[in-house]
Amino acid sequence: MVYLYAKAIHIIFVVCWMAGLFYIVRLFIYHIEAKRKSAGEYTILHKQFVIMESKLWWIITTPAMYLTIAAGALMLYLSPSWLQMGWMHVKLLFVAGLVVYHFICQRIMRQLAAETCTWSSTNLRLWNELATLFLFAIVFTIVLKSAINWIFGVVGLVGLSVVLMMAVKLYKKYRKS
């Protein structure tokens, strides 16, 4: 029964964590694009974005990450046989990548607050898609669990990456016209 509660908590906080990661990068994009406004408007927007980003990060996204990891660790403690499965190693590798992504976002947030960020809005749009790829990779790894299906999953993930990159580039062209 404890395992099921841990699993429910894990799923709930994965959703919260991913929502935070998706939204924080969207805020970064708006923050960068606010530089196109007048100096007075930018000053006001910059202060507001710093507050919004900080609250989202420290009240929702980061606690959700830690609770996701804690609930996942509890599930592995309660079912240690999962650690002998190859797919779990792959999943944990993707989760580690997502944690690195999380802390890079934190660094970007600090750079934006200090007004030292050199990322463009296009780069941030592409960066946002990386979280989508991690999400797809983790979910497909958990659901498919077999080597043959994993190969198809990787091919699908590469295809999704190409489609997402093309969509970002098309959106950039659309915005310029």
Image (cartoon, rainbow, N blue to C red):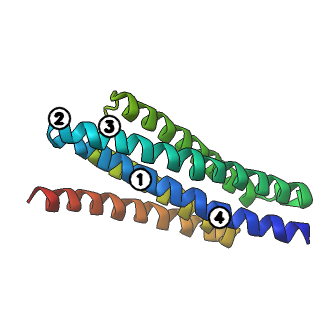
Q: Would you name the residue on which mark 2 appears?
A: 39
Q: Amino acid at mark 4?
A: Thr
Q: Indicate whether 99 appears above or below 78.
A: above
Q: CA distance from mark 3 to mark 2?
A: 19 Å
- Is 57 displayed left or right of 109 in the figure? right
Q: Indicate whether 36 appears above or below 72.
A: above
User: Marks 2 and 1: which is nearer the front?
Assistant: 2
User: Marks 3 and 2: which is nearer the front?
Assistant: 2
Residue 87 appears in the picture as rendered: yes
Q: Would you name the residue on which mark 4 appears?
A: 141
Q: Secondary structure at mark 1?
A: helix
Q: Amino acid at mark 1?
A: Asn
User: Marks 4 and 2: which is nearer the front?
Assistant: 2
Q: Would you name the residue on which mark 1 appears?
A: 128
Q: Amino acid at mark 2?
A: Ala
Residues under numbered marks 4 and 2 in contact, where contact means CB atoms less than 8 Å apart = no
Marker disc for residue 119: 3
The spot of residue 29 in percent (x, y) is: 32, 48
Give the mark nearest the N terminus, 4 or 1: 1
**The image quarter in which residue 147 lies:** bottom right
Q: Residue at x 22, y 61 (%)?
A: 171
Categorize mark 2 by other alpha carbons within 10 Å: few (<14), some (14-19), many (20+): few
Q: CA distance from mark 1 to mark 3?
A: 12 Å
